[in-house]
Amino acid sequence: MSSGSTVADLGEHRLIARLRSRVINLPPHVELGIGDDAAAIAPARSALEIITTDALVEGVHFRRDWTAADAIGHKALAVNLSDLAAMGATPRAALLSLALPETMPVVEFDALLDGFLALAAATATPLVGGNITRSPGPLMIDVTAIGSAPRRKLLRRSGGLAGDELYVTGALGGAAAGLLLRQSGKQDDAAGECLTRYERPTPQLRAGRLVARSRTARAALDLSDGLADGARQLASAAGLGVEVEAEKVPILPAAAAIARAAGRDPLELGLSGGEDYELLFAVGRRQRRGFLAALRRANVRATLVGRLVDDQGAHLVQAGTRKPLPDGFSHF
Amino acid sequence: MSSGSTVADLGEHRLIARLRSRVINLPPHVELGIGDDAAAIAPARSALEIITTDALVEGVHFRRDWTAADAIGHKALAVNLSDLAAMGATPRAALLSLALPETMPVVEFDALLDGFLALAAATATPLVGGNITRSPGPLMIDVTAIGSAPRRKLLRRSGGLAGDELYVTGALGGAAAGLLLRQSGKQDDAAGECLTRYERPTPQLRAGRLVARSRTARAALDLSDGLADGARQLASAAGLGVEVEAEKVPILPAAAAIARAAGRDPLELGLSGGEDYELLFAVGRRQRRGFLAALRRANVRATLVGRLVDDQGAHLVQAGTRKPLPDGFSHF
């Protein structure tokens, strides 16, 4: 194979063989990995199987001239593991479905796998199967992640009660600032941290799992489309309203600097910037101490950003006045 | 909403709500369906979870001007259920991941769901989750199907032994003849049956399950890429060679008629025509009677088409001479 080979030169069978040769050390619960009509895994004892699927589409979620192929592979798995994290689940397997432009160089295919498999190894998520097809248009990466969680310790979206406090992990706006940088083509001293947030998000698996096990949160979700969208969804799943306090939203300092340099309000990135993949929890006041203790064990910071309220609607409280919460980030 | 609305007019949240409102009567093993970060299902007792994913891409697997949207939705699920059938598994859940061109009419989105959900209902495969995103190019439909099978009754690809007989269910070439018709734009008296095979394949779930339960087959797979490809793959998984007998390959009469009218050899459609989604089994001679009895209970015909052999390679035996087996069908 010459260094200039494309995925079309190799074809489906050889691409699958190439992928398969990279997948080693399957854990015992994987009875059957890549190479049969389907994969077979032994379910975790007395637990539920947690299943999610999420796709990254070139031109919608990423650009191949902006983002290295290994970062794309990483992110495709990360966004799915983030969904498992938001349920309090432990990953057990992943499937990778690729639609590849014919002209895609094999080195780019290999790099995409590098990024995917490195995160898979780091999170003990064996790749057990998938599909490879040609795409007459964009590169598409569809991942299915499967995890397990004890039935009574599942973190759902619904279940929040009026008065529950909303806590968010980490700091927000980093991914949106990374996207701003890519869009502007500018370099910035703060670029590194924000680009990493945008291109190689870290799923909060340990935080989700420890909070779920502690049973101290009534509801949770991951912030794929921003805090404003997440707060709305937690409220709507509970049939309630929500208040977010502008002054309390934790903005990543590097993101705030990039926002200001671009003439944007840092709060806007914190509220409406998508793809931070932090977790948002609804916590009853009596559970607050146990909840914060669980997050400390995960070595993750949490910030109180608002509460669920009885009156319908999504509100932002800023300088003592209530106004409508802005919209979230939309990929569509 | 006007009758001319597109999926972009509705946006992701309303499309998901539209889909969700169509999913009713979830079976008890589905703890959590569409609407959370992930779905949750209770695994089947003392069984393995069987997982597969397969995508249909516009311009590669279908054309929207050839095939009605409900047939596309049907087929996207059917090809995944066919993989479960080939493992002897019973479906338990499906995920649907859609990348939709912005200009796609909402009526087409609805029709796609109609086809998907009708087959889901007919096969007791609840839709438990998924993803909807925009596509800047082709329509893509990625489905993950999850089933269960008793551990000791799993139909694998590997496991065939030299001397095992190869049996194929049903008759072949129908889907390839349907594709020929679509390509030529011609009408034909035999069109209906072949177009149905091409556009609305029936996954052989009952046949796969009954054979698996009877433990009379050593190996199996489904014929997504034709008999020649399937025979090669069964042989290769067993580290053996294979012989297919040209005269015994069961060709659908309507497909043979269409092939002849197009100046093509019906055998070529039977061997290299993809997408029939029949099952191919490797059966030890002592198990033959039990195997055929299991298929009779499934009300499915099986034809002996060849055998696994000790010498490497894939051979076609025709008029007493051995020649190389042609290639299979490739989607790449």
Image (tube, coloured by chain):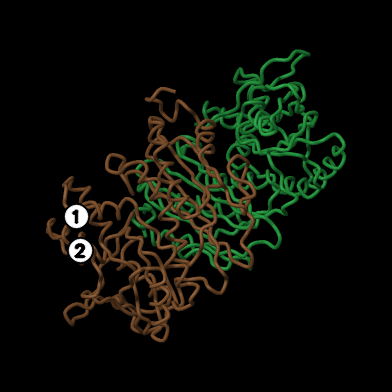
Chain colours: A brown, B green
Indicate the position of residue A72 as horizontal and vertical percent values. 37, 45
- Check disc 2 and report its element: helix, strand or loop: helix
Indicate the position of residue A274 as horizontal and vertical percent values. 30, 59
Q: Which residue is mark 2?
A: A253
Q: Is residue A282 above or below residue A61?
A: below
User: Mark 2 belongs to which amino acid?
Assistant: Pro
**Residue B4 seen anywhere in this rendered image of the structure:** no
Q: Residue at x 20, y 50 (%)?
A: A181
Q: Residue at x 62, y 59 (%)?
A: A43
Q: Is residue A32 above or below residue B249?
A: below
Indicate the position of residue A143 as horizontal and vertical percent values. 47, 50
Q: Chain of mark 2?
A: A
Q: Chain of mark 1?
A: A
Q: Is residue B287 above or below residue B147?
A: above
Where is the C terminus of chain A found, in terms of image quarters? bottom left
The answer to whether A264 appears left or right of B262 in the picture is: left
Packing grade of label 2 (10 A; few <14, some 14-19, many >=20) is some
Quarter of the rendering containing residue A235: bottom left
**Residue B175 seen anywhere in this rendered image of the structure:** yes
User: Mark 1 belongs to which amino acid?
Assistant: Ala
Q: Residue at x 70, y 33 (%)?
A: B238
Q: Which residue is mark 1?
A: A190
Packing grade of label 1 (10 A; few <14, some 14-19, many >=20) is some
Q: Are marks 1 and 2 in contact (CB under 8 Å)?
A: yes
Q: Nearer the viewer, residue A15 or B290?
A: A15
Indicate the position of residue B215 as horizontal and vertical percent values. 80, 46
- Check disc 1 and report its element: helix, strand or loop: loop
The answer to whether B189 appears left or right of B213 in the picture is: left
- Residue that protrudes farthest toward the bottom in the picture: A286
